[in-house]
Image (tube, rainbow, N blue to C red):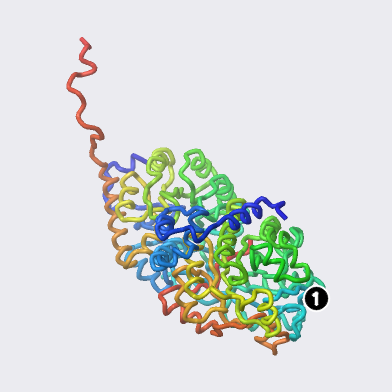
């Protein structure tokens, strides 16, 4: 499992971290360092650092302004299919869940994309469930080729081989998001009960293959609350840090999803696995701590804030640490121009459309950015 | 460029780039503040040239930077996002297509952490762009050989960085920029890193032809007022350069015994 030097390094450091050993003074020292090292990230993620949250916020805000000015990028996700071959206990798309499954036809895709384009958005994230059979690489490639006519295109799909990423890049995709869910191999094995997603290392190395396939940028993240969120955040931070070190041209960004309620059946299974409702312990304070720590550790990296969070939280992290936000989100298959063809992956907490989101960004004195990328 | 100092007054002092003459020597970046502020900041800066990222241009769409540029401003589109010379050229062509004119600031960066320019690719891009008739202004790390290559390749001006972009650290590369001013017969425009008006003034005092700034203005408490401060500082530095700074004794007085006292 450790044939990637990045993976070996991330796992060793995450395993070794002793968060309880950090004092507030350690966190303060980390905070005051001009360039943070991996050990500083661990200090900022420690329970002791929670007492410095306000100071972390002040410094993070200054770093965000320095690197991003007052720009906030807007995008929206489009789920094109929700078939899945994995049995992940925390996910609405779990192949054992009795939900409506569907995938968009080319005509339906076109209608959905036209609808999104009419809102003024210029960046899209195409998502599928993880089923090579039902939503193969060719199918995704066709969606990318269609989307590039309107948008900057990113994909959040199952991990691919380098050649497949190169193919999607040729079709017009430039960004790839893959979340490790949890970096803890044991919990990973426990919550991914069946299906190709059980291949931990193949997933871990997806970003490296995407970059070798020519993609411009990659996103990393863990589903906070699945495992020990501090350890998972540390691992995600180190993963991003090493990706940038080995691929210095790559644009790196973080996503910070928290575990949200999912279909009722899987909730029960989740309780069986964890012995408690998953997601425990990651309140808004803790989520903010993770985001601020990422900002301070890698001030140049993007941070995307999910619609899983409430509007008030999302608005306040803009300009503070988050640099990208989704608007007009639906998490079912299609559902904008046409009736939803499949059920959603999770519940969203911020239903605002593009106009409302844009107004909220402006109200905070920030600049909404619709376009920030050229496919060259 | 030293000869420029002789006898010129402010009234006949123009910045010439690519056959165009500019009165202002303050080039404004536009990426880090709200679009509504663009006009006020440009006016207060007295700027006649402004950079913009082509990748941000949303022609015909929402929040398009081009819609906020006042008429009369010379646009200096940059190739931000380019990782190779070829990509920079494609972005330059796009800039021309969307009506930004022939000026282009060549930026080729292969490092997302510090955003330091790649001089080799930048020189290549400069050559390719100049061949296509662009007025190319390469953003570069102040290296004399690279600057010579860029001048040879047809650059209209050279834009060395003072410090890492966005850092507000000032003229960390002062001595190397001074060498470029001395050796390169093109306008040397200090770009990136200038954090305070005094630093902009210093860049002009050592012979820079112009200064570009963005973060310093955008992160100020009042961007419009800071633009005004930069304008004055750049003008003061320019006048000082034209006047020819007086001699400054760098060390304390030397020991009294003359070293050449043995001569008969």
Instruction: Check the image and name the residue furthest to the left.
Output: B256
Work out which quarter of the rendered image holds the N terminus of chain B and state it.
Answer: top left
Residue drawn 46% across and 58% down? A22
Residue nearest the viewer, comparing A132 with B206: A132
Q: Where residue A224 appears, x then y in whole percent?
A: 58, 70
Q: Where is residue B141 drawn, in percent x and y?
A: 48, 46
Q: Quadrant of residue A240?
A: bottom right
Q: How many marks?
A: 1
Residue found farthest to the bottom: A339
The residue where tag 1 is placed is A134
Q: Is residue B83 visible?
A: no
- Give the residue at x 22% y 12%: B263
Q: Secondary structure at mark 1?
A: loop
| Residue B72 at x, y percent in the picture | 41, 67
Which of the 4 image quadrants contains residue A219?
bottom right
Q: Chain of mark 1?
A: A
Please identify the quarter of the rendering in which residue A122 is found: bottom right
Query: Going by the image, does B214 lie left or right of A229?
Result: left
Q: What residue appears at the point 52 percent right and 83 percent down from the top-left corner?
A: A355
Q: Is residue A339 left or right of residue A44?
A: right
> Farthest residue in the top direction?
B264
Q: Is residue B182 left or right of residue A358?
A: left
Q: Quadrant of the C terminus of chain B?
A: top left
């Amino acid at each position: 499992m450790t044939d990637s030097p990045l993976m070996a390094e991330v796992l060793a450091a995450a395993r070794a971290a002793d968060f309880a050993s950090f004092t507030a003074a350690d966190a303060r020292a980390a905070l005051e360092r001009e360039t943070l090292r991996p050990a500083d990230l661990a200090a900022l993620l420690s329970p002791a650092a929670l007492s410095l949250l306000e100071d972390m916020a002040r410094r993070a805000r200054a770093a965000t302004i320095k690197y991003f000015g007052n720009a906030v990028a807007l995008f929206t996700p489009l789920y094109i299919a929700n078939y899945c071959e994995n049995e992940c206990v925390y996910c609405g798309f779990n192949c054992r869940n009795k939900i409506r499954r569907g995938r968009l036809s080319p005509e339906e895709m076109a209608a959905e994309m036209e609808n999104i384009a009419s809102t003024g958005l210029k960046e899209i994230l195409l998502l599928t469930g993880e089923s090579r059979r039902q939503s193969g690489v060719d199918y995704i490639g066709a969606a990318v080729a269609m989307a590039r006519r309107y948008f900057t295109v990113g994909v959040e799909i199952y991990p691919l081989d380098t050649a497949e990423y190169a193919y999607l890049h040729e079709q017009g995709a430039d960004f790839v998001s893959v979340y490790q869910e949890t970096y803890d191999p044991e919990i990973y094995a426990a919550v991914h009960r069946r299906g190709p997603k059980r291949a931990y290392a193949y997933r871990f190395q997806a970003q490296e293959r995407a970059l070798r396939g020519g993609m411009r940028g990659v996103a990393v993240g863990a589903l906070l609350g699945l495992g020990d969120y501090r350890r998972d955040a540390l691992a995600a931070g180190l993963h991003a840090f090493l990706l940038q070190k080995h691929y210095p041209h790559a644009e790196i960004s973080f996503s910070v999803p928290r575990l949200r309620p999912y279909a009722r059946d899987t909730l029960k299974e989740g309780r069986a696995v964890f012995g408690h409702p998953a997601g425990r312990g990651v309140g808004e304070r803790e989520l903010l701590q993770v985001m601020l720590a990422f900002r301070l550790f890698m001030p140049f990296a993007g941070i995307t804030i999910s619609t899983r969070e409430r509007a008030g939280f999302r608005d306040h992290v803009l300009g503070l640490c988050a640099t990208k936000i989704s608007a007009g989100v639906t998490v079912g298959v299609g559902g904008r121009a046409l009736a939803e063809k499949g059920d959603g992956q999770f519940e969203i907490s911020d239903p605002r459309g593009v106009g409302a989101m844009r107004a909220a960004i402006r109200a905070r004195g920030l600049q909404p950015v619709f376009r920030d990328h050229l496919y060259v | 460029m030293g000869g420029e100092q002789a006898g010129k007054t402010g009234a006949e002092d123009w910045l010439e780039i690519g056959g165009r003459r500019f009165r202002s020597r303050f080039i404004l970046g536009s990426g880090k503040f709200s679009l509504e502020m663009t006009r006020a900041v440009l006016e207060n800066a007295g700027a006649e040239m402004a950079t913009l990222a082509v990748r941000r241009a949303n022609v015909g769409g929402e929040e398009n930077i081009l819609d906020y540029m006042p008429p009369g401003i010379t646009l200096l589109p940059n190739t931000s996002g380019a990782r190779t010379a070829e990509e920079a050229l494609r972005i330059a062509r796009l800039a021309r297509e969307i009506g930004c004119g022939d000026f282009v600031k060549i930026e080729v960066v292969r490092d997302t952490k510090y955003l330091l320019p790649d001089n080799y690719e930048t020189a290549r891009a400069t050559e390719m762009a100049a061949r296509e008739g662009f007025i190319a202004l390469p953003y570069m790390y102040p290296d004399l050989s690279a600057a010579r290559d860029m001048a040879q390749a047809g650059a209209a001006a050279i834009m060395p960085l003072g410090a890492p972009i966005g850092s507000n650290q000032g003229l960390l590369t002062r001595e190397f920029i001074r060498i470029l001013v001395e050796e390169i017969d093109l306008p040397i425009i200090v770009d990136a890193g200038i954090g305070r008006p005094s630093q902009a003034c210093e860049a002009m005092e050592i012979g820079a032809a112009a200064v570009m700034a963005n973060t310093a203005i955008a992160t100020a408490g009042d961007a419009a007022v800071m633009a005004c401060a930069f304008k004055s500082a750049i003008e003061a530095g320019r006048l000082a350069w034209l006047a020819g700074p007086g001699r400054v004794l760098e060390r304390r007085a030397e020991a009294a015994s003359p070293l050449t006292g043995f001569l008969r």
